[in-house]
Image (spheres, rainbow, N blue to C red):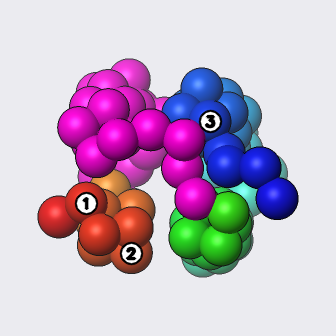
Amino acid sequence: MARITLQRLVKELNKLKPEPDAGRLKSHDYARRLARMIQQLRERGLDADRAAATAALAEALERGALTAPMEAHPHNRLGLA
């Protein structure tokens, strides 16, 4: 399987974030979908280095595409911390 690009990860985070804001997705479902995304990243790998991935996650947090409580999950599960 091909590695996941950093642009794809950011696109998926942007697509996921409006769901709980609009009330269409509960917080535990948001966490579950984020965990599924992280699992796919672990299985397929990310086509970016650690610095680029960390910067992209920080930028997603600033934009609000990633919630503060959920920020630690990608860092810890992908070994970026």
Identify the image quadrant of residue 63. Answer: top left
Residue 19 in the image, given as x and y percentages of width and height:
71, 44
Mark 3 — residue? 5
Compared to residue 20, the image places residue 72 above or below, namely below
Which residue is drawn at the image coordinates 56% and 70% (left, top)?
A: 42
Amino acid type, label 1: Leu
* Residue 16 painted magenta: no
Which residue is drawn at the image coordinates 17% and 64% (left, top)?
A: 81
What is the CA distance from the residue labelled 3 to the residue labelled 1?
Answer: 16 Å
Examine the rendering and report whether any part of residue 73 can be seen: no
Identify the image quadrant of residue 59. Answer: top left
Identify the image quadrant of residue 35. Answer: bottom right
Q: Earlier in the sequence, mark 3 or mark 1?
A: 3
Comparing labels 2 and 3, the label whose residue is closer to the camera: 3
Provide the secondary structure element on which disc 3 rests. loop
What is the CA distance from the residue labelled 2 to the residue labelled 3?
Answer: 17 Å
Residue 51 in the image, given as x and y percentages of width and height:
23, 37
Mark 2 — residue? 77
Circles 2 and 1: CB atoms closer than 8 Å: no
Q: Quadrant of the N terminus?
A: bottom right
**Which segment is the magenta one?**
45-70
Left or right of 57 on screen, residue 66: right
Compared to residue 60, the image places residue 71 above or below, namely below
Provide the secondary structure element on which disc 2 rests. helix
Q: Which class describes the residues within 10 Å of circle 1: few (<14), some (14-19), or many (20+)?
A: some
Q: Which mark is residue 80?
A: 1
Q: Which class describes the residues within 10 Å of circle 3: few (<14), some (14-19), or many (20+)?
A: some
Single out the residue that lies furthest toward the front: 1
